[in-house]
Amino acid sequence: MKTMLPLALAVLGLTGCGPGDSLQPSAPPTLTVQTTPNPVTIGQTLSVQIGLQNGSEPLFLALFIEDPEGRIAQILPNRLPDGAPTLKAGQPVTFPPPGALYELRTVAPAGVHTALAYASREPLKLDGISSYASAGATFATVNRQGKGSLEASLLSAVKVVNPGISQLTSFEVKAGVSTAP
C-alpha cells in the first residue's frame, strides 16, 4: 500500500493542472516588411515599414535593398538622426520616419527590387559587409554586389556574425510615364 500512495499523489498533482494552467511555448519572433506604395514609379517616394511579432526584447535592425541589376544599398543603419533604430514587438519602424526632413525617392532601373530586413539582439556588426566611404558619408556602401547577392551572399555573411531573424520581400518599380509630345 505504501507504494500506491506516492503514485496516487503524483497523479493527483499532474491532473490538478488543466490545459489553461500550463505554460504554452511562445511563437518564435518574426519580421514583416511592407513597402508603400507597391508598385512605385521611378521618381516617387517610397517608405518601408518593418514590424516584429512575438518578440519580447528590442532588436537592432538592418535594411538592405537590391535592385534588378544587383546593386545593393544599405538603408539601415545609417548616420541620419534615428538611423540606427531598435525594433520592438507591436512598434513598427518606418523608413523614412514620420516627420523626417528627407525622403527615399526611387530611381532607375525599373523592375523587381528586393528588400531584406535583418534583426538581432546584439548591436549589428557589419564590418566587412559594409563601410562608410568617408567620415561624412550618410549611408554605408555594401561590399557585396551582384545580381542575387542579397539573398545568396549578403544574408549569409550577416547571419554568421549577427545571430538573428530576417525577412525578404519584393516590390516593383515601374518606369515613369513620359509627358513629352
Image (tube, helix red, strand yellow):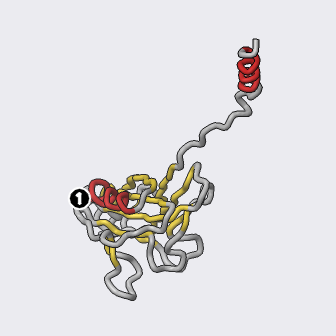
Q: Which residue is mark 1?
A: 147
Quarter where residue 100 is shown: bottom right
At 76% across and 11% down in the image, what residue appears? 1
- For the residue pair 43 and 101, the one nearer the viewer reads as 101
Q: Is residue 144 left or right of residue 64?
A: left
Q: Name the quarter where the C terminus is drawn.
A: bottom left
Q: Position of residue 61 (x, y in %)?
A: 48, 64
Q: Position of residue 146 (x, y in %)?
A: 22, 62
Q: Is residue 63 above or below residue 152?
A: below
At 34% across and 72% down in the image, what residue appears? 127
Q: Is residue 119 above or below residue 140?
A: above
- At label 1, the amino acid type is Lys
Q: Is residue 140 left or right of residue 12?
A: left
Quarter where residue 149 is shown: bottom left
Q: Secondary structure at mark 1?
A: loop
Q: Is residue 130 above or below residue 147?
A: below
Q: Is residue 180 visible?
A: no
Q: Is residue 54 visible?
A: yes
At 35% across and 59% down in the image, what residue appears? 160
User: Farthest residue toward the top?
Assistant: 1
- For the residue pair 34 and 76, the one nearer the viewer reads as 76
Quarter where residue 157 is shown: bottom left
